[in-house]
Image (cartoon, helix red, strand yellow):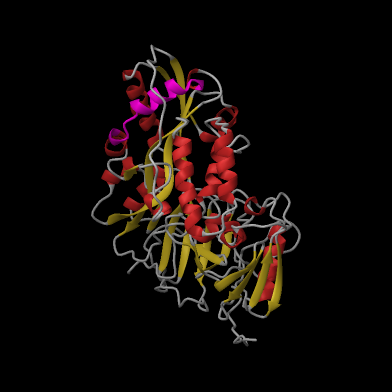
């Protein structure tokens, strides 16, 4: 058994007081603090068992056992290595130099406790739904995880933000408390509701001393307000700069862009209405030209989609060409095309696509609402077409799950209302594969099968745009948008 070196860190104390986000990036005592604005506020007190989990990783507070590369393959993070001992069991060797923000060393007991708490959460943590996961400490630095049945994605699940590892004291009644209990380069010292948070550098961080002394975070859902604050010198790092705001940035700001496994696509309702006819779906597919959307609406800050999945996701897998039926004459058929304005470019993109469909012979009405008000109707199939944005690798970094949720008869996010037995069977067969290369080829084949139905028209793959002030370095360029602040992030001042 490896013996863990005793590691101690000064415990983090919850402090009161208001967030100080104005002025320069250094406090009166000369500390170098990063002023960060994130696009979405917490909705569940930063509980990792909710969508707030990604806020913890973006702030550099908490980490999972594995991370993902651009293709979605698992890479070491808090776990140094792993092996699958059978089709439902994996054994992971932990790093032996990790200490929680409260000074407690991370050992197998702590990791197993964190995973088991997530597995017992009510409501269930999304990535563990139906998995029946149990974790057991084998020795001080080795943890075994086991699913109730064969699970080819068992290790991949451990990279989900919801499964970040927190110290034992984070867990009690209700949701875990991440304040002072993470393993990342920065520790939360205070949270001011949904408005802001204060973080200090974790000097005992396992991957080196953080470059900055701390992070002052604002949660600002107004993209224009975030960008304006960056221009005014009130912020150092701003997540999610809209394309329309790019020309307003000056010489003292720049944008870090990263290609994402996120597709903007036009889903066509295959169950009712005009697009229940495959020939009219084929006509819509033929009418869509992505280039004007990419170059005009997104000003080149996106990639024309070769398919639903990016080339990076598919890696060396061969991408079969879809085969569509012959297109019919729309003859003025009326359709309602819906989109949401939470992503600023979507309404304008919908307008461009609507004109292309009109030119092909359709009569088009465009409906724009906020996503929250639109979602029930989207899921109920109330529209003929929906222009939306979707992350294709989801929680596990695996594209097969995307096809299962979005394009099967029982899929929970099947905006196209697609129900093709052959697609369902192919998704089930692909989900049983254990070899990563075979799963990627199966994903490429699934993409061709779905596109051949005409149920969806890929338009573009998005890029993340993080605005940074002059001198800022080391901002995360993560295709999963899970990292913004890293151990290397610094204002340079």
* Residue 281 image-quadrant placement: top left
Q: Quadrant of the C terminus?
A: bottom left
- Say which of 306 and 445 sits in front: 445
Q: Out of 315 and 386, give the one closest to the viewer.
A: 315
Residue 173 position in % (x across, y down): 76, 59
Where the N terminus falls, by quadrant?
bottom right
Residue 482 visible to the viewer: no
User: Looking at the picture, how far across and down is residue 203, in whole percent?
Assistant: 50, 77
Q: Can residue 139 be seen in this view?
A: yes
Q: Residue furthest right?
A: 173
What residue do we see at 53% from left, 45% from top? 402
Foreground residue among 448 and 22: 448
Vertical order, 377 against 396 (above or below): above
Residue 470, given in percent of the width and then of the height, sits at 29, 61
In the visual, does 298 lie left or right of 138? left
Residue farthest to the top, as pictured: 331
Which residue: 73% across, 51% down? 122
Which residue in the rendered view is the most extreme toward the left? 251
The reply to whether the magenta stretch includes residue 71 is no
Helix, strand or loop: magenta stretch = helix
* Left or right of 358 on screen, residue 79: right
278 within the magenta span: yes
Q: Give the range drawn in magenta.
A: 276-292
Rendered location of residue 208, percent (x, y): 46, 78
Count up the numbered dots: 0
Relative height, residue 261 to residue 450 (above, below): below
**The image quarter in which residue 280 lies:** top left
199, above or below 391, in the image: below
Nearer to the camera, 144 or 386: 144
């Amino acid at each position: 058994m490896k013996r863990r070196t005793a590691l101690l860190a000064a415990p983090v104390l919850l402090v009161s007081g208001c967030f100080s986000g104005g002025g320069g990036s250094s406090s009166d005592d000369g500390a170098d603090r990063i002023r960060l604005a994130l696009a979405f506020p917490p909705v569940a007190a930063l509980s990792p068992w909710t969508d707030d989990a990604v806020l913890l990783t973006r702030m550099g507070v908490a980490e999972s056992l594995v991370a993902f590369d651009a293709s979605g393959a698992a890479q070491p993070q808090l776990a140094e290595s792993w092996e699958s001992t059978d089709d439902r069991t994996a054994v992971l060797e932990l790093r032996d130099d990790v200490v929680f923000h409260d000074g407690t060393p991370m050992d197998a007991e702590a990791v197993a406790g964190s995973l088991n708490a997530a597995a017992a959460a009510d409501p269930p943590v999304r990535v563990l739904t139906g998995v029946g996961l149990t974790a057991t400490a084998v020795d001080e630095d080795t943890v075994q995880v086991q699913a109730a049945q064969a699970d080819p994605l068992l290790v991949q699940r451990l990279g989900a933000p919801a499964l970040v590892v927190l110290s034992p004291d984070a867990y009690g009644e209700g949701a875990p408390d991440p304040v002072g209990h993470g393993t990342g380069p920065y520790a939360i010292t205070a949270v001011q509701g949904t408005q802001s948070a204060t973080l200090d550098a974790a000097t005992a961080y396992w991957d080196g001393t953080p470059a900055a002394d701390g992070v002052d975070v604002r949660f600002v859902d107004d993209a224009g307000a975030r960008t304006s604050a960056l221009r005014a010198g009130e912020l150092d790092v701003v997540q999610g700069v809209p394309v329309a705001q790019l020309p307003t940035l000056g010489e003292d700001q720049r944008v870090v862009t990263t290609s994402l496994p996120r597709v903007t696509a036009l889903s066509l309702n295959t169950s009712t209405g005009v697009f229940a006819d495959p020939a009219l779906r084929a006509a819509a597919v033929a009418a869509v030209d992505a280039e004007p959307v990419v170059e005009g609406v997104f000003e080149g800050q996106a990639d024309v989609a070769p398919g639903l999945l990016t080339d990076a996701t598919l890696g060396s897998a061969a991408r079969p060409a879809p085969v569509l039926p012959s297109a019919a004459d729309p003859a003025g058929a009326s359709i309602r095309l819906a989109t949401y304005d939470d992503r600023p470019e979507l309404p304008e993109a919908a307008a461009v696509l609507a004109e292309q469909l009109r030119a092909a012979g359709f009569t088009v009405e465009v409906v724009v609402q906020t996503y929250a008000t639109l979602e029930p109707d989207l899921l109920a199939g109330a529209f003929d077409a929906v222009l939306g944005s979707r992350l294709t690798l989801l929680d596990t970094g695996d594209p097969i799950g995307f096809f299962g949720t979005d394009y099967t008869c029982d899929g929970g996010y099947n905006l196209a209302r697609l129900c093709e037995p052959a697609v369902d069977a192919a998704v089930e067969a692909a989900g049983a594969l254990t070899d990563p290369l075979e799963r990627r080829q199966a994903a490429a084949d699934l993409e061709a099968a779905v596109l051949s139905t005409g149920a969806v028209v890929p338009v573009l793959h998005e890029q993340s745009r993080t605005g940074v002030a002059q001198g800022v370095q080391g901002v995360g360029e993560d295709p999963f948008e899970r990292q913004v602040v890293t151990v290397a992030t610094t204002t340079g001042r």
